[in-house]
Image (tube, helix red, strand yellow):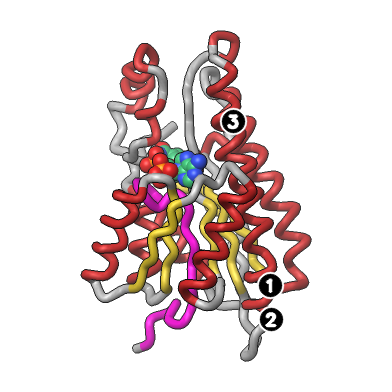
Amino acid sequence: MAKELAGTVAVVTGASSGIGAATARRLARDGASVALVARRGDRLAEVAREIAEEGGAAQPVVADITSRVGADSAVEQAVSAFGRLDTVVNNAGVMLVGPFADAPEGEWERMIDVNVLGLLYMAKAALPHLIKAAAGEPRRTADLVNISSSAGRVARAGTAVYNLTKFGVNGFSEALRQEMRPLRVRVSVIEPGNVDTELTSHTRDELRAGVEAQVRSIEKLQPEDIADSVAYVVTSNRRVAVNEVFVRAADQS
Ligand code: NDP
């Protein structure tokens, strides 16, 4: 039986670790050719090698998506490697936890640069290609999947700016969904709860232990659990638009 994403091309940002790496592996397994975007080239090469070992196609694309030039170049490299673009998973993100009043401004700026501006630059660069793919024959759809967070639905003390970015991603995704609907580009948002990745490793040393202690008692989601949600969204029949998926760990409050 043909794989569901055979003949399609996906870009996954933040594919060097965690949810992005698992999503890239999953989309490749479902038949997509995948461009792997992030800054750490050695980690991307490792993910690409794993995908190739399973018989899939992947292309590492080293880029910093926080610049317009970096995002444009990532999309252009993907399209020149594989000839088209059907699926974009806007996954790259950072979370720097701590009370707002004490946080260095550089931490807010990093979260806004990656989680908001990087996501917007990638969307802007990719949309013309997605619109073209969706307009192809036979009539089909293309997908822009934005990875938000449970922090885009529920705000908590200690994550104010992260909440700002993820609530923003949710609002942006819904508005863009409405703009893209007539063009058959499905825009979706996925809101993971606690997932076992490197995300908390960037928080300042003096705060990290506290952050990790808060979730130690629960069984975290695995990155593959979120990759399953992405696959569900992008392999759904073209008559179906899964607009929003909120996935918490079963133990999570
Ligand atoms: P990781 O830290 O494992 O992954 C983050 C990814 O983002 C890395 O691949 C990193 O690659 C990439 N990245 C960071 N900055 C840039 C940049 N400037 N340009 C390009 N890529 C960049 O964490 P997760 O897998 O957990 O995070 C993935 C997404 O999931 C994020 O948006 C996060 O907010 C969201 N999320 C995570 C949850 C969790 O509990 N883990 C819960 C809810 C949402 P590199 O450093 O190589 O550039």
Q: Secondary structure at mark 3?
A: helix
Crowdedness near tag 2: few (<14), some (14–19) or many (≥20) residues, C-alpha within 10 Å: some
Distance in Å between CA atoms under marks 2 and 3:
35 Å
Q: Are marks 1 and 3 in contact (CB under 8 Å)?
A: no
Where 250 falls versus 186 (above or below)?
A: above
Image mark count? 3
Locate the C terminus by quadrant.
top left
Q: Residue at x 54, y 14 (%)?
A: 103
Q: Which residue is mark 3?
A: 163
Along the viewing direction, whichever of 13 and 174 lies nearer the viewer: 13
Which circle marks residue 11 in the picture? none
Which circle marks residue 135 in the picture? 2
Along the viewing direction, whichever of 228 and 147 lies nearer the viewer: 147
The type of residue carrying mark 2 is Ala
**253 in the magenta segment:** no
Write the start and end of the magenta stretch as one range.
Answer: 2-20
Distance in Å between CA atoms under marks 1 and 3:
30 Å
User: Which of the 4 image quarters holds residue 109?
Assistant: top right
* Quarter holding ligand 1: top left
Q: Are marks 2 and 1 in contact (CB under 8 Å)?
A: yes
Q: Which residue is mark 1?
A: 131
Extreme top residue here? 102
Q: Residue at x 61, y 33 (%)?
A: 112
Q: Which of disc 3 and disc 2 is earlier in sequence?
A: 2
Q: Secondary structure at mark 1?
A: helix
Picture coordinates of residue 196 (x, y %)?
Answer: 32, 40
Mark 1 vs mark 3: give the one in front: 1
The type of residue carrying mark 1 is Ile
Q: Secondary structure at mark 2?
A: loop
Crowdedness near tag 1: few (<14), some (14–19) or many (≥20) residues, C-alpha within 10 Å: many
Q: Residue at x 56, y 21 (%)?
A: 106
Picture coordinates of residue 226 (x, y %)?
Answer: 41, 53
